[in-house]
Amino acid sequence: MFTYFIYFIVFLILSYVTIIAVKAITRGIEAKENIKSNINEKKEDEDILNFDKKKQTNLVNQIKELNNLHDEGVLNKEEFEKAKKKILE
């Protein structure tokens, strides 16, 4: 009878340790997924910022080109303003 009592206590202890281990593994997996999603979000944010920088650089280059055409006399002031407005829209 005493041996059954010992077996029962050992079973309870092993069950408790197993439950703790499963919880720890689950938390570790969730943490790893959160880290991956944060990294992906940062990459997406960087891609968006890089796209905006490229777009701004492109706009600046187009306006500079228009300004050069205006300075050379190819475009008058009205044409320059219309073209600049069209680029900025």
Image (cartoon, helix red, strand yellow):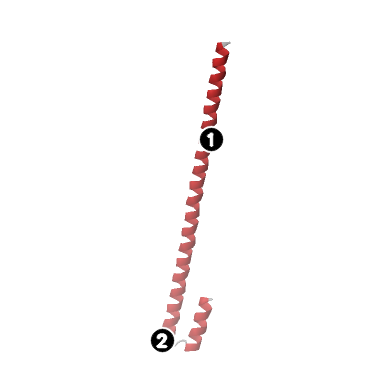
Crowd band around label 2 with a 10 angstrom C-alpha radius: few (<14), some (14–19), many (20+) = few
Q: Measured from the top left, where is residue 67 in percent x and y?
A: 43, 82
User: Given the current orientation, which residue lies at the most extreme top position?
Assistant: 1
Between 9 and 59, the residue placed more toward the observer is 9
Q: Are marks 1 and 2 in contact (CB under 8 Å)?
A: no
Q: Is residue 19 visible?
A: yes
Nearest-to-viewer mark from 1 and 2: 1
* Image disc number at residue 59: none
Q: Measured from the top left, where is residue 80 in percent x and y?
A: 48, 84
* Image disc number at residue 72: 2
**In this picture, is 33 found above or below 9?**
below
**In this picture, is 21 found above or below 50?**
above
What is the C-alpha distance between the residues marked 1 and 2?
A: 73 Å
Q: Quadrant of residue 3?
A: top right
Residue drawn where x is 50% and y is 88% of the image: 78
Instruction: First in sequence, mark 1 or 2: give its number.
Output: 1
Q: Measured from the top left, where is residue 7 in percent x and y?
A: 55, 16
Q: Name the secondary structure under disc 2.
A: helix
Residue drawn where x is 58% and y is 10% of the image: 1
Q: Name the secondary structure under disc 1.
A: helix
Q: Which residue is mark 1?
A: 23
Residue drawn where x is 55% and y is 11% of the image: 2
Mark 2 is on which residue type? Glu
Q: How many marks?
A: 2
Residue drawn where x is 50% and y is 54% of the image: 41
Image quarter hosting the C terminus: bottom right
**In this picture, is 70 found above or below 32?**
below
Q: Quadrant of residue 4?
A: top right
Q: Quadrant of residue 16?
A: top right
Crowd band around label 1 with a 10 angstrom C-alpha radius: few (<14), some (14–19), many (20+) = few
Q: Measured from the top left, where is residue 54 in percent x and y?
A: 46, 67
Mark 1 is on which residue type? Lys
